[in-house]
Image (spheres, grey):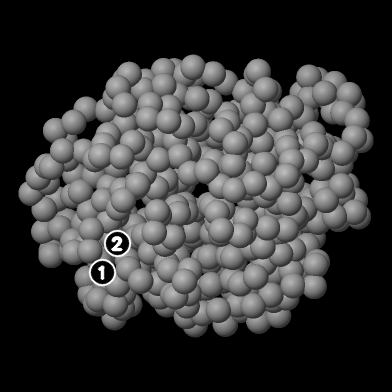
Amino acid sequence: MTSVSRARRAAYTAAVLPLSAALALTVAVWPAGAAPAARHDHGHGHDHSHDSAPARVVSTATLPDIPLAAFSNKLLPGTVADDRGVDLGGIGSDLYPAERRGEYWTVTDRGPNGQISVGKDKRRTFPVPGFDPAIVKIRTVGDRIEVLKSIPLTTTSGKPVTGLSNQPGRDEAPYTYDAGTPLSYDPNGLDTEGLVRDPRDGSFWLVDEYGPSLLHVSARGRVLARHVPKGLNLTGADYPVIESLPSIYLTRKINRGFEGLALLPDGDLVLALQSPLLNPDKNSGEDSRTTRLLRFSPRKAKVTAEYAYRFDPVGEVEPGQTKTSELKISAIVALGGDRLLVQERTDKAARLYEIRLRRGSDILGSAWDSTATSPSLEQLADPAASGVPVPAKRLVVDLGKVEGVPGKIEGVAVEGSRTLVLLNDNDFGMTDGPGAFDANGRLVDSGIETRLVRVRLDRPLR
């Protein structure tokens, strides 16, 4: 941990973080009638006729150091005995407009975690295994991010869900901070990512990477239902588990489940799979540029559509990068009507695109949802040329060219017609490898802070 972090940590008081009353949700969308002009993609799903809009950072705010034990134990007393010097972080997993302008709902992921190689084995470490993922409401005050409200995620009986792996043989085995001692699996564990809030009752919908799954959570954080792929066979969870998603999603890559979530104007949800499925095998998934989006109707409690999403070549997203497997979707935003803003990123660069979810692009229930189909959707070098309806996309902005934008942006929102709001995931200040903690088991902080930046475009989004 840096000396500045230690000083901030020492100065932190035990005062309860201020809370604000829950109000009706206000959704930020593009102006009515501002749909882009008609265009043709010749079946390849990518429109190069529009350059990205020049942009600049107009404000930056930083989350102050808040000891993780103090934060967690205020929500659920006794959950964290030792935070090993880790501060609150990871809240940048998503960003969603709250009821007042300038306020946002965010969500942590599963908590501090890393990887340490032991022989040929890469072990997943959980330095603070009692950490409970939480929904966190924030706003900016000058150059600081202020926490307004925090909601812990809990099971039906009110217990913390934790962020630990669910199932042996499917998820990574959990270990202590030094990778020396195995931890118990937890069927209640969640690796939460995308988040939206239902304006009708204040409940939340979140996506998770383990299942991968879609969660319905009460306004107080209680898991009401977890929708998972058919055939997952998750047992022992202390909340309802519903096998309602296509079984092909069982082939998701570890740590690359659902990451983005959007709430459409008609109340439907869109779930974004972070990376291509490992379908039919690991090499096919690692080399693929085709991931998937699911449309889910909360009213019907079922998936109603599916779309193939085509990444740009990785070298276009991050010049110089050659590993296609570095491509990810970490955020999607509803823009009104059938329009979505989709973020393509690596850990060092990110781009935002607009797509439209047209009825003719639906592949749900087709041969592409069967693991018996060969070649699979993920194996197709050019899905559009093979008859797959791939939504056309338009580049809105290349964030890699905007000075002052942090790396690993996972939270994206739209403010008005010309401002993007971005939040990074700082991984709780952790790094991988045995050097993440010192000889006393205390965090060696990466120095990466959680930052919220506002980016102003030179022309309106349209």
The structure residue drawn at horizontal position 15% and vertical position 58%, both measured from the top left corner, is 384
Asked whether residue 80 is in view, the answer is no
The structure residue drawn at horizontal position 9% and vertical position 45%, both measured from the top left corner, is 40
Q: Amino acid at mark 2?
A: Tyr
Q: Residues within 10 Å of mark 1 (few under 14, many from 20)?
A: some
Q: Position of 202 compared to 353: left or right?
A: right
Sequence-first disc among 2 and 1:
2
Q: Which mark is residue 307?
A: 2
Name the foreground residue: 425 vs 168: 425
Q: Position of 294 compared to 43: left or right?
A: right
Please tell me whether mark 2 sits on a helix, a strand or a loop: strand
The structure residue drawn at horizontal position 58% and vertical position 42%, both measured from the top left corner, is 98
Asked whether residue 421 is in view, the answer is yes
Q: Amino acid at mark 1?
A: Ile
Q: Which mark is residue 186?
A: none
Report, in whole angstroms, how far the alpha carbon at label 2 lies from the one at label 1: 6 Å
The percent position of residue 151, horizontal first and vertical second, equals: 73, 51
Q: Which mark is residue 363?
A: 1
Q: Is residue 417 above or below residue 357?
A: above
Q: Name the quadrant containing residue 181.
A: bottom right
* Marks 2,1: beta carbons within 8 A: yes
Q: Position of 2 compared to 300: left or right?
A: right
The percent position of residue 245, horizontal first and vertical second, equals: 45, 74
